[in-house]
Amino acid sequence: MSALPCSDTVHPVRARSLDWRRRRGYRNACRLGRQVSSLAETFGAVCLGPDDFVGSLYCRSGLGDDAVAAVRFDASGRTSTIVVPTLRTWHRPHLRALANRLASVSYAYGRIVLVVPPAEVRRQPRLDNAERIVGSMRPPAAGDLATLARCAAARGDVADLATCAAALPGPHALERIFGLMAGGHLSIDLDAALGPRSIVRLRASCWSTPWEVLGWQPPSPDRSI
């Protein structure tokens, strides 16, 4: 993030105010990047880190790292970039339109970019649930998925979290279930508070990407700006 120079044309007080605003925007964008990573990883995506190429494209058009977060993921063998504008960016119609326009332009550079509203990323209790899962998940043991498949099949293809945890032998059963979800094998309803009665399902084979589960869709390609 570049500092704003104090010159004869910028009043020092104004410069400090803008510099503070940019620092706050940068912190907010970083937080959104971490939050969208937690959501994506919970639904089976692998975080590849910040997308410097897309970030540069946005920055050159006036949306720097204090205005948007741009994070790249591998999901179902396809690489995509999620761009999340800060609230300040999103609530300014011309900046929101620019963020969406640049996502379409990115197709010309071989990038798939999805712009996601900050409120959608921070939707509760889904975000809290995702952060809990990512923060506590452990690698599953051999046979865990088969055991849970039998457990769910015996109960009409669904089982609650407590029943699934009880079916797994050994320690850290709940954390291993979370690991299976992050691995793309299980589905847990995160739109309600995560607890013993949360419903667990085997992931549907028709899911092609985590973005479909989250309801996020890429814009139509547009090679002009």
Image (tube, rainbow, N blue to C red):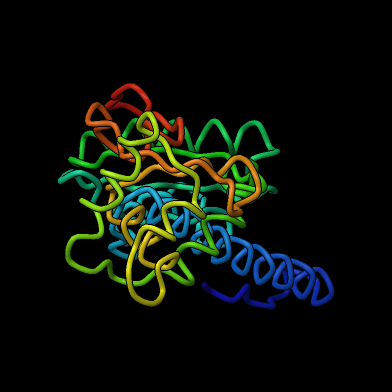
Q: Is residue 161 above or below residue 205?
A: below
Q: What is the x, y in percent for residue 99?
A: 49, 39
Q: 212 or 108: which is nearer to us?
A: 212
Residue at the image point whose x is 39% and y is 29% from the top: 217
Q: What is the x, y in percent for residue 173?
A: 40, 67
Q: Quadrant of the C terminus?
A: top left
Q: Can you tell which quarter of the image residue 120 is in?
A: top right
Residue reaching furthest to the front = 154
Q: Can you tell which quarter of the image residue 31 is in?
A: bottom right
Residue reaching furthest to the right = 13
Residue at the image point whose x is 30% and y is 24% from the top: 222
Q: Is residue 213 above or below residue 200?
A: above
Q: Is residue 2 left or right of residue 93?
A: left
Q: Is residue 155 left or right of residue 122?
A: left
Residue at the image point whose x is 28% and y is 37% from the top: 209
Residue at the image point whose x is 51% and y is 48% from the top: 84
Q: What is the x, y in percent for residue 5?
A: 63, 76
Q: What is the x, y in percent for residue 160?
A: 50, 45
